[in-house]
Image (cartoon, rainbow, N blue to C red):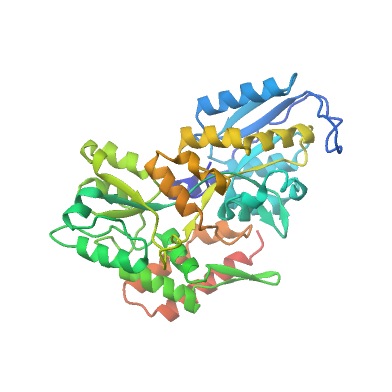
Amino acid sequence: MRSRLLPAAAALALAAVAGLTACGSSDSSDSSSDSAGSTPAPAKLTVWIMQDSMSDGVLSRFKTGFEAAHKGTTLDIQIQPWDGIGQKITSALASKDAPDVMEVGNTQVAQYAASGGVKDLTDKVSDLQGSDWIPGLADPGKIDGKQYGVPWYAANRVVIYNKDLFAKAGITTPPKTRDEWIQDTTKLNSGGNEGIYLPGQTWYALAGFVWDEGGDLAVKDGDQWKGTLDTPQAKAGMAFYRQLQALGKGPKDSDEAKPLQADVFAKGKTAQIISVPGGASIITKSNPAMKDKIGFFPIPGKTADKPGAVFTGGSDLVIPEASQHQALAYEVVKALAGTAFQTDMAKEMSYVPNRTSLASVLDGNPGASVMAAGAANGHATPNSPNWAAVEANNPIKQYMTQVLTGADPDAAGKTASEAITKALNTAS
């Protein structure tokens, strides 16, 4: 499933250790594995898919189609809970009886590749149309120049807005630039309404603003990582965040989950929130009367020709080295990453397909099509196996609250950068 699209996902993905269950098949080894030009022998393959990642219908159609196209081959699709999955996958990769294909969070690929046991698929990138992959989804799967993770699906944040409040403010077209966004939000922040509900610790939004300035949260210098919240680019991104956040009543010391921002928006007095499109369903569940009042637009960029940068969360597919059916496992990955499955998945799940050329399959789904437009400027968090350690005691959130409450941005940025540097360079 998508990695860290919502705070709860990260907590579940890094939760307490769960025991390793039977994961591989006991069938005889695939003797044609990795043989150039060979036809994979029929076999029973085990495929791990994360809980709530795909609907039963999508998986059932895929299983039926794949087995029909590969006579004698059986897919054992096993649904895995997020709770304890990190240790479970690590253990499976170290075993001699691993599943054949695994879904993993895109930002987790570096961690698993570093632990060993993930097949290098660099020579398959061209065959998989890798030049068309969404960069923010593909980049985390590439470690030290080698592609271990194959992009599967993506999701990213957009702006959810109240159409009624926009109309009352005389705004007929959503903003496309930062300047227009500030102007419109200022208009909306009147008459007892707030222009935007933006909590002080929505750090994925800040990351986008920093990327727009040409900066990053951390960069690799040789073999070491260095936190970069004290750079001019990061400070410029934070300055814009501060300007936007002041146009609403969001708390400066919490994130979008405390309180749940969808519930705040559902009251009808908030003009905008930054959220994945799925947040709309939470809004309407809280207040069904909001159903026809909800609209979506990409996070505006610095110029109108390009949407604002966004964090691309999602999932990759990996093949364990210990898979007993390497050639067939690749066929499964190729099919899951291919046009037919990507189209079916995108239409049913409202996810962004893994290739930019497939964005049009989301036409007619307002939230998903806007999300796909934003994904064109998608980015990933620093591609370090230790990035989870940064989020565990998130110095980015602390930095944001400090700046928003009057601390010196230079000093706060230096402290946060030092904390990030330490976390990324500490042996796991």
Q: Residue at x 37, y 74 (%)?
A: 239
Residue 367 horizontal side relative to residue 214, left or right: left
Q: Residue at x 65, y 52 (%)?
A: 131
Q: Residue at x 28, y 57 (%)?
A: 197
Q: x, y (%) of residue 35?
A: 86, 37
Q: Nearer the viewer, residue 97 or 145?
A: 145
Instruction: Work out which residue is located at the far left of the displayed protein and give it.
Output: 191
Q: Is residue 329 above or below residue 195?
A: above
Using the rendered image of the protein, determine whether residue 139 is visible from the camera's viewpoint: yes
Q: Is residue 70 above or below residue 8?
A: above
Which quadrant holds the C terminus? bottom right
User: What is the count of numbered marks?
Assistant: 0
Residue 318 horizontal side relative to residue 250, left or right: right
Residue 352 horizontal side relative to residue 124, left or right: left
Q: Nearer the viewer, residue 132 or 44?
A: 132
Q: x, y (%) of residue 180?
A: 31, 66
Q: Residue at x 53, y 61 (%)?
A: 390
Q: Nearer the viewer, residue 282 or 88?
A: 282
Using the rendered image of the protein, determine whether residue 247 is visible from the camera's viewpoint: no
Q: Nearer the viewer, residue 211 or 144?
A: 211
Q: x, y (%) of residue 257?
A: 35, 51
Q: Is residue 150 above or below residue 378?
A: above
Q: Is residue 424 above or below residue 33?
A: below
Q: x, y (%) of residue 52?
A: 49, 34
